[in-house]
Amino acid sequence: MDIQVKTMAEYMALGETPDILFWVGCAGSFDQRAQKITRAFAYILDKVGYKFAILGKEEACTGDPARRSGNEFLFQMMAYQNIQVLNGYGVKKIVTICPHCFNIFRNEYPVLGGNYEVMHHTQLLQQLINEGKLVMQGGGAFKGKKITYHDSCYLGRGNGIFEAPRAVLEALDVELVEMKRCKTNGLCCGAGGAQMWKEEEPGTTRVNWERSAEAIDTGASIIANNCPYCTTMLVDGVKKAEQEDNVVVMDIAEMVAASLK
Amino acid sequence: MALVSQILFIVLALVAFYLFFRKVTAIRRNILLGRKEDRTDRSGERWKNVALLALGQQKMFKKPIPAVLHFLVYAGFVLINIEVLEILLDGILGQHRIFESPLGGFYNVVIGFFEVLAVLTLVAVIVFLIRRNVLKVRRLNQPELNGFPKQDANTILYIEIVLMTMLLLMNSAEGALRIQAGTGNGFWVSQLFAPALTGLSTESLHLIERICWWGHILGIFAFLNYLPYSKHFHILLAFPAAYYTRLKPMAEMPNMPEIQNEVLYAMEPDKAPSLPPAPSEGGGETPEEAVPLRFGARDVQDLSWKNLLDAYTCTECGRCTASCPANITGKKLSPRKIMMDTRDRTEEVGRLLDAGKNPAEDGKSLLHDYITVEELRACTTCQACVEACPIGLEPLSIIHQLRRNLIMEESNAPAEWNAMNANIENNMAPWKFSPDERDAWVNG
């Protein structure tokens, strides 16, 4: 995939203003699996001619894991720094592939002086599909495939966004099979609240194993995701269940990128 | 004789209401030990929550079977109280079935309807007892319920059985008396039982009717005073809890303005307020007046009053725990236990205050002595507990505040979190990557 990506600084040097800032997030920037999601989404934006920018080296962690772990000082420091950068560039609109970053921008930065219009990438994909800008080839590469969708806590329950990702899956013409615990009752992947960075407490099983088993039980060949952390956790859970030959864990952006004309 | 029983009744009623009022006042005082927090905005939405969550029990219906049973007991409780009103008026005024003559024929319909509700309540309560004690539904038999909580739940159900049985037996005796006098045959349900009692003497029937009448009302007075010591207090507190529940998205964590400002003043010292003027000679305001700063919560007084209201409201149904990913996978965390611990510690602090002691002096705190680090660490902040609560209680809010205290006051974090936070601080990402690599994905 050859993608044209410019930073905010580059746009500024050109004297231009991008339509939207693509906030990549830490997982999307550094995690090898999540980088594929980032590239897929950037590819889509590029393909439809959406004028987007990234912050590049100027992007920094929103502070979400620090705040959830209890370290409010560090969160406030990161927030201060990020809001300075964003406001300095006059950013108005942000899209992100990470529901944790999404939640921070949508709910937690405004009181600190960071007011932006925020979209999760599945929302932007839905919008592009509705506007007819995104057209899938022959119904898409996933037409008729049995797929289950995992609601991330911070996009779903936490922010009430259940329909946008499902609408995108519908446009891909898949056969969506819901897990018993879905939408408001969705089960966590186990990574939230800074759990991603530590071992779980002793228990009978791991949260991601429990959730992956539930997803595998639907008989779906693909587990569709909206969060890079959920993707990591479920990839691991599918491996644990030795189902990696039968079940693929994908972000919705990757599915769309693979289906474009 | 009639006058004696009238006076006795009035005295008992006054004592019952006084004791209840005294305990409720004490609980109110305990709840207000919590930190101030404004939850009075958007009153329209708040009243809507009272209507939907508390009155309408909307969220209960996520689990239809217990929801229907619970609704029967709830409707029975609320409506049968109209008959209790009649009993109260009869007792005070020395009358017998005071509503009968003004209501005429409609009285039979009303009482008959209450009897049907009483039967339905009995059925529901028996099913509840079976679910708890025979079927042993998992969420009703988890470790935090061992001891008093389990006994409490069963006690409430037994009291309901006794009250409903007395009500039906009272009306059946009344029906039998009316058959003997040729003035009627009882009400919708009691008329089925009344004929079986007609063999008894009029005196015996009068006695049964009176015993049941007194038993029913004394049972209600006892129940009223048991309520504030029980998880069953939710029948009253569910209404304020639903009113004050959070209206913001569940994923949003509240800001800490004192830390926000501290960071701001560190970055932009010119914005820091100038030092307060030195206290003028001859006393005046002393620095002690400044509120001692506490990061997060260590004990119940550090939590908001809403957290403490939640704790007293929780009826230990365990829907939160049943939906908690940590609990489902065998970790020690149980959001229900968080609520129960918070209530128990608040009660303990209240008792210390009642005894004229400083609650800080018992050397205990909610954090560590009630809720352990291991429980707090297991939370994924997924908000399933908040979503699951039928009346919008927020166990996660308490977890967040205790976690803040652990990290910011005790520097108590697992090594992995120390590394994560150090990486965020130094590398701008929770992993040890160079910030220069942040856009490397473009060329991936």
Image (spheres, rainbow, N blue to C red):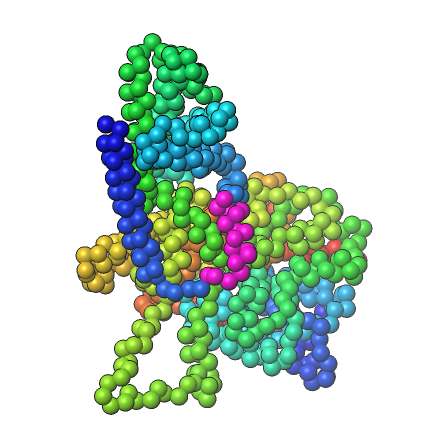
Q: Which residue is pictured at 38% across the width and 61% down the height?
A: B304
Q: Which residue is pictured at 72% across the width and 66% down the height?
A: A45
Q: In the figure, residue B226 lies in which quadrant?
A: top left
Q: In the figure, residue A22 lies in which quadrant?
A: bottom right
Give the x, y percent position of residue B32.
34, 60
Q: Nearer the viewer, residue B383 or B374?
A: B383
Q: Which residue is pictured at 28% across the width and 50% down the height?
A: B22
Q: Relative to B230, does residue B353 appear above or below in the rendering?
A: below
Q: Which residue is pictured at 45% across the width and 44% down the height?
A: B319
Q: Count the labels in the image.
A: 0
Q: Is residue A220 left or right of residue A141?
A: left
Is B52 included in the stretch rendered in magenta?
Answer: yes
Q: Nearer the viewer, residue A1 or A117?
A: A117
The prevailing secondary structure element of the residues shown in magenta is: helix
Outermost residue toward the top?
B199
Q: In the figure, residue A105 lies in which quadrant?
A: bottom right
Q: Which residues are magenta?
A: B39-55
Q: Is residue A113 left or right of residue A144?
A: left
Give the x, y percent position of residue B413.
36, 64
Quadrant position of the C terminus of chain A in the picture: bottom right
Q: Nearer the viewer, residue B131 or B197?
A: B197
Give the x, y percent position of residue A114.
57, 74
Q: Is residue A55 left or right of residue B285?
A: right
Is A252 included in the stretch rendered in magenta?
Answer: no
Does residue A10 appear in this view? yes
